[in-house]
Image (cartoon, rainbow, N blue to C red):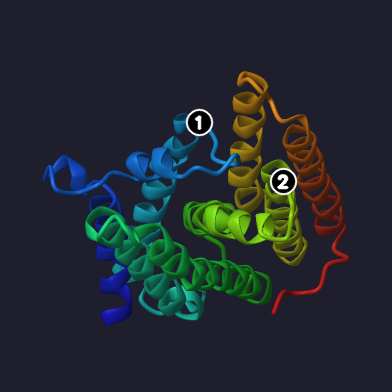
Amino acid sequence: MLRRALNLVLPPLMWLSSSMNLLTDSARSPADMSDANPSLLVPPGIAFSIWLPIFLFCIAYGVIQALPSQKKNVLFKRVGWWTAAGFAAVCGWGLINGFWPAASVQMVTAIWFVPSMLLLVRAMLRFQSAETETGITSWPSKIGISMIAGWCSIAVFLNWAPQTAAWLEQMSLSPVTASVVILAGALLWIGFIGFKSRGNGAYLFPPIWGLALLVYKRLNADPAYIPIVITAIIGIAALALIFIVMGRNRRAGVQRPLR
């Protein structure tokens, strides 16, 4: 009952915690944090509108798993504590983002976001593993868990980008080169999880969305920083290829259950 209650309550609380600026003038909004991030990898503000479908699908998951008919559903038992922990971590991130002292909020949110992302990625992989083993599925639940894991997988690198770029610049790398290195690291991680998830489109879409809007922003900026644009385009193509190839393998039945 506790597991089901947490997964029912925490998704709307994620939405609320990230919207505290609408309730009090003393809270920062996610947009404020984005604008304060000096990284060349921050996409335009519209990229963060993806949180709306993420919140809605996660809320749908919470409602579905809380239904009396789903009380003994093995799928939700396998994943429920992982999603609850991940959702709680995102709630914490929203509150830190809104109220932590400005001098250190960038570093604290960057550190906090790492375990948040790992919990959600683990939840997604366990969901798919249980789905394969039991033959049970819930598409709204799968989409919500996968999308939040995918967006957090790229967002965690954006959170770390200013600090990482500063460290790399101390090694005589230019800001553009440092940004390319950070972006390449993000793509390696997302590609690895995309492969493990057997080309889960709901996981891969949010990073592709963010990368596409990053390309748009950089091409409409002066200077455009073409190396970043090229890296992002290569990333989009690579993630799309993982989705296509792994999807074909999955439909052909050659993929083993995930662990």
Residue 84: image location, x then y, percent = 37, 72
User: Mark 2 highlights which residue?
Assistant: 174
Is the N terminus in the top left, top right, bottom left or bottom right quadrant?
A: bottom left
Outermost residue, left direction?
24
Distance, label 2 to label 1, CA atoms, is 22 Å
Q: Which amino acid does label 1 sit on?
A: Pro
Give 209 or 95, whichever is nearer the viewer.
Answer: 95
Q: Residue at x 35, y 62 (%)?
A: 104
> Does 9 sit above or below residue 161?
below
51 left or right, relative to 29: right
Q: Residue at x 62, y 18 (%)?
A: 220
Residue 81: image location, x then y, percent = 41, 79
Is the C terminus in the top left, top right, bottom left or bottom right quadrant?
A: bottom right
Q: Which residue is drawn at 85% across and 63% down?
A: 253
Residue 44 marker: 1
> Does 26 sit above or below residue 11?
above
User: Would residue 139 be seen by someone viewing this image from the given angle?
Assistant: no
Category of crowding for the residue at label 2, using alpha-carbon neighbours closer than 10 angstroms: few (below 14), some (14–19), many (at least 20):
some
Element at label 1: loop
> Does 167 sit above or below residue 219?
below
Element at label 2: loop
Q: What residue type is labelled 2?
A: Ser
Residue 164 marker: none
Q: Quadrant of residue 101?
A: bottom left
Please name which of the two marks, 2 or 1, marks the residue nearer to the observer: 2
Give 219 or 53, whichever is nearer the viewer.
Answer: 219
Instruction: Answer whether labels 2 and 1 touch (C-beta < 8 Å).
Output: no
Residue 51: image location, x then y, percent = 42, 44
What number of labels is visible?
A: 2
